[in-house]
Amino acid sequence: MCKQRVEPALRHAQTPVPIYPMLGTWKHVPLQLLEMRGATHETYRQEPDAENIELCKTYFKRMSSVSQILEMGHLGRVGTGWQRVLRIAGDRKGSESAGRREKCRQVYQGLSPISEKFTIAAACKAGSVVKPEQLKDMQAHAREQIKAATGKDIQKPLSFVVGSGFEKDKITGALAAGVVKMSVEIDAQGACWEGLQKFYKAQEGSPQAEDKPLKYYGRISPPPNLPADVLAELKETATKLCAPGKGFLAADESAGPWLRAGHAEAAKIPDVIENRAAYRSMCFSTPGLSEHISGVILHWETLFQDDADGKPMVDIITGNGMVPGIKVDKAYDKKGMWGTEVGPLGHPEVSTKGLDDLQERCAQAYKKGARFAKWRNVLQLDPKKGLPSKLAIMDTVHTLARYASICQSERLVPIVEPEIVPNGDHDIEYCRKMTEIVLAAQFKALADHRVYLEGAVLKPNMVKNGLKGPKADAETIAKLTVQTLLRTVPVAMPGIFFLSGETALNEDNEEEATVNLSTMHKLFPKLPWHLSFSYGKALQKTCIVTWLGKPENKEAAQKALKARSNANMDAVFGKYVKGSCPSVGTDGNVLQAAGPY
């Protein structure tokens, strides 16, 4: 029996190029290599050609059904060892050329009715029987004989495999003659290198700068419907928001933030508009807050609200060196999406509302002074029920992508927030798996909606265990979170701002969020994006408990807010020391107000 050597075939090449020995690449369209999942088989035989061909026919019939490629070698029994395998030969006298042509024709006649997936080995170097230019003669002879016998005019019926070691100027001629596979040695490498040099040389000459390429490949272009000045403004705003060390103050609660602080005493503060205005103006006017906070996310009420002295909240924020932003989603209905499973939040999977009039509201917000926006979609985890479902994921990512594109059309930088809530008993590994799936789908959706990534930011959850699941430490949270982001978030996106999320009652929400962020930067000091915070109660809890609705506590509350903001800035630089920032801790912890906000 024939000794066989099986090696994988390249799947993606459609034209012959110099490649490593024994890796086949195909030119003929009928070979359909892109559809093949087989390999190249080579014959190593010493029988006469006729017997060799007959044996190969039997073998080829069996193997062609599973997309195998047969490489015919050792025609003419010339030489020994590798020379024997790599040569096509007749005798070495006057009938040499005719013998080569006839043997090639015999191979084609014997194998082509079975499959066109075969090649003929041919050495093309000094000492070999065949020269590159002689391959054309073989092609012409086979073409003539086939046309006479069948009436079919096949321009290049033969596919040749050659050795290496011949001059570069002969490579082009050999490829044109039907060579589909070639060994690579120094000469062929040189030909490849010169070709690559010419290709890259042709990319020079960008009007932007000498060191910029003429064209970027594989990159989604900005939305064609947005003028250059809009794109420039979006990028400028995003750059401001991603200032080194700075993050967001999330002050976008519909009710008083003390109701979501998860503290027994804070929950007693009356939730009236006067208290909400007093608290917010106190926070926004905190001296030096802009040293740590780049943007403030507002609720719609706050965007149009004045303080007790009649000064607009937006003016207080901008006057204190920060950028106003606006929450534009309209939360979700707990009835959820019909047919979906009930998750750990106690209701089915949900879809966030607010797209219908979003264009108009974004225009109003920009006119009022907002320069970025936020939209939150919620996903629940339950491994046993398979949550989140594919339906919920697709609804989330495309809703967020549609929102983002609308925001950008109105000059607002969108915060994209696909939040996977921590409620449930799942472990951290399940959260990692689903977060990766969701973020991958999210950026595919953003690409589909032509969202300009340089003018947007991401607000994801950290990868954590469920509130009732096995507890993961800060280092594990940091490693899995950053690993997930590195696998999914394009470097074109300038910033990632974590939400803090809910924590267990025996955990200090403020301290946990700060430590987790700092650990990420300690373990990963160099990242491709600005990795920061967008915290609500994780910035404000101690501030709220210090204030408790009493005007005389204003200064102390502001100091508490600034201290925690400064702690998180330290965390962005990986320098926060656990316990160094005053915190109310876990004393008085109660479940925060549930549901949408």
Image: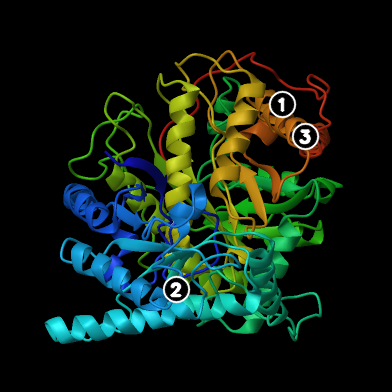
Q: Are marks 1 and 3 in contact (CB under 8 Å)?
A: yes
Going from the N terminus, do you reach mark 1 or mark 3 first? 1
Per the image, label 3 sits on a secondary structure element best described as helix
Q: Circle 2 is placed at which residue position?
A: 93
Going from the N terminus, do you reach mark 2 or mark 3 first? 2
Q: Is residue 423 visible?
A: yes
Per the image, label 1 sits on a secondary structure element best described as helix
571 and 142: which one is in front? 142
Q: Circle 1 is placed at which residue position?
A: 515
> Would you place residue 478 above or below residue 400 in this image?
above
217 and 516: which one is in front? 217
Q: Do the residues labelled 2 and 3 touch (CB within 8 Å)?
A: no
Give the residue displayed 27% in from the left and 72% down from the top: 105
The label number, if any, that marks residue 441 in the structure image: none
> Would you place residue 362 above or below residue 86 in this image?
below
Q: How crowded is mark 1: few (under 14 residues within 10 Å), some or many (20 or more)?
A: many
Q: Circle 3 is placed at which residue position?
A: 571
Depth-wise, is mark 2 or mark 1 nearer the camera? 2
Going from the N terminus, do you reach mark 2 or mark 1 first? 2
- Left or right of 218? Residue 177 is left
> Would you place residue 187 above or below residue 595 in this image?
below
The kind of residue on which mark 1 rests is Val
Give the residue displayed 70% in from the left and 66% down from the top: 237
**Alpha carbon separation for disc pair 1 and 3:** 7 Å
The kind of residue on which mark 3 rests is Ala
> Farthest front residue?
93
* Quarter where residue 577 is shown: top right
- Left or right of 383? Residue 252 is right
Q: Are marks 2 and 1 in contact (CB under 8 Å)?
A: no
**Alpha carbon separation for disc pair 2 and 1:** 84 Å
- Left or right of 499? Residue 6 is left
Per the image, label 2 sits on a secondary structure element best described as loop
